[in-house]
Amino acid sequence: CKADIAFLLDGSWNLGRRRFNLQKNFVVRVTSLLGVGLQGPLVGIVQVSENPKTEFILKEFTNSKDVISAIKNVTYRGGSTNVGE
């Protein structure tokens, strides 16, 4: 059964840059095990903080290599904690 996955990364000041990078590393490890592709799951990332940002949508990348590269390029935004918008 195929299931697409959207990860939420906490990019708030509450977590800080070091723990933000730990989150990214975890998501990279999980993604590398998923077999991302048109026949497997697709992955998306939303960074939540004062101004939540969709880093990339589910259909943007269709292979693990590109998804992992995109995850590694997500930059820490900082800001207050706010997951509601």
Image (cartoon, rainbow, N blue to C red):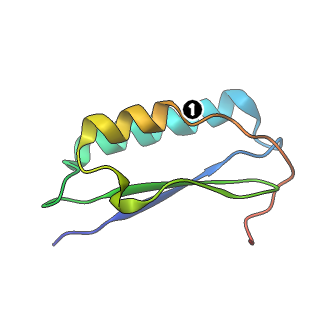
Residue 10 higher or lower than 66, as above or below: below
Residue 58 lies in quadrant:
bottom left
Image location (x, y in percent) of residue 57: 45, 59
- Residue at the extreme top of the image, as rendered: 18
| Viewer-proximal residue among 83 and 44 | 44
Instruction: State the residue at coordinates (57%, 32%).
Output: 22
Q: Residues within 10 Å of mark 1 (few under 14, many from 20)?
A: few
Q: Quarter holding the C terminus?
A: bottom right
60 left or right of 11? left
The residue singled out by tag 1 in the image is 22
Q: How many marks?
A: 1
Q: Residue 48, image x and y in percent?
A: 69, 55
For this orientation, the residue located farthest to the right is: 80
Instruction: Examine the image and state in which quarter residue 84 appears.
Output: bottom right
Left of 14 or right of it: where is 43? left
Q: From the viewer's side, name the closer residue of 30 and 79.
A: 79
| Disc 1 residue type (three-letter) | Leu
Provide residue 13's location: percent of width, then percent of height: 83, 41
Give the quadrant of residue 27: top left
| The N terminus sits in image quarter | bottom left
The reply, left or right, for residue 27 in relation to residue 78 is: left
Q: Position of residue 29 (x, y in %)?
A: 36, 36
Residue sitting at the far left = 39
What residue do we see at 19% from left, 69% from top?
Answer: 2
Q: Is residue 45 left or right of residue 4?
A: right
Badge 1 marks a residue whose secondary structure is helix
Residue depicted at 18% across the width and 48% down the height: 35
